[in-house]
Image (cartoon, rainbow, N blue to C red):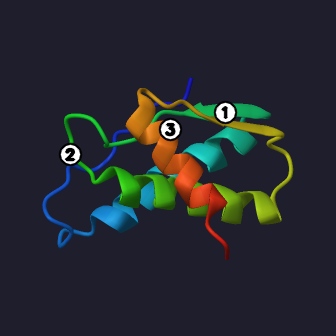
Amino acid sequence: MIHTVGPIWRGGGANEAILLQACYQRSLDLAVDNAIQTIAFPAISCGVYGYPIDQACQIALETTLNFLQTNQSITQVIFACFGDLIYNTYLKIVEQPN
């Protein structure tokens, strides 16, 4: 298990996006360092920490996809969606044309 603590949303001016991206990046780095091939992420900071779900999901997907472009040792990434809102937000982002 890799544990990460996401940032508390403070309105967007306290480097929250950089901190959240670092949570995903560091977790992925640790997975590789420990020969972990499958990793699951909840929607980090989207609960009581109040991070806007659409922004958090975008950061999660972008960070993970960027990582996987240069490192194929992780073979499966699961985004655990606790509720329809988070699930539908991930779907909306994935279905957007580039």
Q: CA distance from mark 2 to mark 1?
A: 23 Å
Q: Return the disc, 3 or 2, that comes first in the chain's sequence.
A: 2
Residue type at tag 1: Ile
Q: For the point 86% across and 52% down, which residue is it?
A: 72
Q: CA distance from mark 1 to mark 3?
A: 17 Å
As drawn, the residue found furthest toward the left would be 10
What mark, if any, has residue 70 been given in the picture? none
Circle 2 crowding by C-alpha within 10 Å: few under 14, some 14–19, many from 20: some
Residue type at tag 3: Tyr
- Of circles 3 and 2, the one toward us is 3
Where residue 50 appears, as percent x and y from the top left, is: 20, 45
On the image, which quarter does residue 6 sit in? Answer: top left
Q: For the point 53% across and 48% down, which residue is it?
A: 90
Where residue 80 appears, as percent x and y from the top left, is: 54, 30
Q: CA distance from mark 3 to mark 2?
A: 17 Å
Q: Return the disc, 1 or 3, that comes first in the chain's sequence.
A: 1
On the image, which quarter does residue 98 sit in? Answer: bottom right
Circle 1 crowding by C-alpha within 10 Å: few under 14, some 14–19, many from 20: some
Which residue has dot 2 on it? Answer: 50
- Of circles 2 and 1, the one toward us is 2
